[in-house]
Amino acid sequence: MEELDPRNVRITDPFWAGRREASSQHGIFHQWQMLEHSGCIDNFRIAAGEKEGFREGWFFADSDATKWLDAAARIERDQHSEPLCALMDDFIALLGRAQEPDGYLFTYNQIHFPGQRWVNLQIEHELYCHGHLIEAGVSHFLATGRQEMLSIACKAADLLVREFSQAEPAMTPGHEEVEIALFRLYAATHEDRYRELARHFIEVRGHTPHFGRSLARQFISNGQRERLIRSRRAGYFAQHPGEQRDRLPAANRAVKPRFSLLRFYGNSLSGRYFQQHLPVREQLVPEGHSVRFGYLETAEAMMLLEYEEEPLFNTMKQVWSHMVHRRMDVTGGLGALPDREGFGRDYELNPEVAYNETCAAIASVLWNWQLALMTNSAKFTDLMEWQLYNAVLPGMGWEGTTYLYNNPTLVRGGIERQPWYSIPCCPSNLSRTFADLGKYVASGASRHIWLHQYVGSTITLPQTQIDLEIHSQLPWQGKVEVIFHPRRIGEVMLRFRVPSWTESAEYRVNFNSKSYLTYPKFEYEQPLSGVYPEKSYYAIIDREWREGDRLRLEFPTPIQIREPHERAHALRGRVAVTRGPLVYCLESIDQPGVDLFKVRLDRSSLREVFAPDLFGGTLLLKGQSVRGEELTFLPYAQWGNRGKSQMNVWVKG
């Protein structure tokens, strides 16, 4: 099947349209203001020689700005905004002035260490930053058809081709991302050298001899550079005290288990943190930093779409299964350990510790989409839906201007949404994900249509000459109507996804009698968190669709109790409550005086209650504890929007 051009989809969904509007009308402008306020944009002005000052932010701060540009371009593609275009145009011109003549743009080195390049590639995100620069160029070109930003991207990519096409394995990126960017640039330009460099980075990964020694040297080098910067910074602001900026909050505080820092160093020196411990075809288990892992798997899947290769595909299927069954939270969140922001051991899931970084869920969505394009398998689009609702959506506040970096499933206090962070990688990543939602709804190929996500929308499918209207009551009710508007008459095979979260399904075409669907029977491994995306499948209707034909789908949305695997020791005696595609939680603001962490749920007491005035309309679950205490369960995606509070997903039950 072929990916749908997002410009052929207009989202009308009552639920998702609001989330996209919060991002495009408020979030994207707020993000720019915070990038200016934090000094991130001034870094480029300093690099361009247009301003005096001291560079602010982490060594990877450039990527926060170029990822914003990427998100802004994807938003502009769908809905024109003069103010947003003006910001993009000014920033693109600034990037052009800051970029060096040969294409290099990394303000950390340009300002602090002029003339030094590619010094500590495993740590300092140099190639990662160039990757986001390239992605911004591709997205802006696809949105506007203009060449200015694409030229900057190609200039940077051509530099990488010259520097790295024959480079040794030690010269691979420490944080994967540039591989995705290069595949996207190839798709936009059809210049083969870009995909060949992406393939080279993937193929030589994990082949560095004595990786731990090399990494230790880079840790020492980076430490020396950072100490020098701190010394210069102190001197600069002693002379210019009025220029010092407000300190930004760090990422949300995370509870850390015993020996976590020691485990982090072991994970790093072994190469696992960086996915450098083995060649990619031998990496059978998800390891290390979960965002890095997700971006690497996405790039590998993109490579498989270009260069078909059965052994690597078999490896990827095994890795995916291992992740879902043994290392994924009930929300679809990934990354059990805070210090490494990544995977722990099999079945290691403490809800208070679990990190579940927002960007890790986004990376998983990107990976699953590539797998879906490759295989036409519903389990990948099913997991995408689950993660979009429960692991991605919680990252942005309901108003679009506050964010969560990490997403534990138990909060005693101390985690709350912030307008910005010292590491603000998630906000613009959320905005570009919401902007791209349309391309995940459906796809087509010759006489075939796939319906993946039940998001209200109008869709033009050039491959089949059919336009669709989708009306969806999700996530509150499992009722969907699809109206067909063919531009030519002919038989088309429709495949629509039957979600894993329903127990049965039925459909009706026009006024014909209902047809009932049941799940195929097969054996599958019990997952860590009770989530079974493999249950999902595509049902098929093969017929000649005529103007105004209506397909009515109904997926029952029962309240379900998800039980963890018996080997998840930290979750023994606990359950998670879900309904339809949503995970639910207890939030302290809804049940004052109730101990969320000791209360025991009476499973039989749960019932549905619609609250029309809460977040524009929300379906709550009401119930009682075994002692008769009143309990209110809220969708996990909406927690933390009413002030600081406690929260619990995995309740005693």
Image (spheres, rainbow, N blue to C red):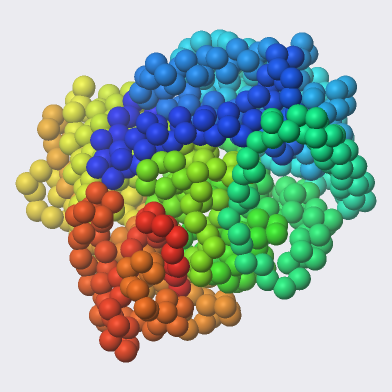
Depth check, front residue: 336 or 411: 411
Of all residues shown, which one is farthest toward the bottom? 627
- x then y, percent, for residue 274: 75, 49
Q: Looking at the image, which residue is at 37% across and 56% down?
A: 642
The image quarter containing residue 651 is: bottom left
Compared to 226, does 636 lie above or below? below
Front residue of this view, candidates 47 and 527: 47
Image quadrant where one finds the C terminus: bottom left
Residue 209 visible somewhere in the drawing: no
Can residue 462 be seen here? The reply is yes
In the image, residue 486 sits, relative to residue 508, either above or below, namely above
Q: Answer with left or right where residue 142 lies relative to residue 264.
A: left
Give the residue at x 61% y 23%.
185
Of residues 159 and 355, which is closer to you in this image? 355
Residue 40 at x, y = what percent? 64, 30
Determine the residue positioned at 48% across, 52% down.
417
Number of marks in picture:
0
The spot of residue 198 in percent (x, y) is: 70, 31
Residue at 80% x, 30% y: name it: 239
**From what the image shows, is residue 524 above or below residue 33?**
below
Quadrant where the N terminus is found in the figure? top left
In the image, taking residue 287 as reference, residue 547 lies left or right, namely left
* Of the pair 389 and 549, the residue shown nearer to us: 389
Q: Is residue 559 above or below residue 124?
A: below
Q: Quadrant of residue 643?
A: bottom left
Q: x, y percentage for residue 545?
A: 18, 34
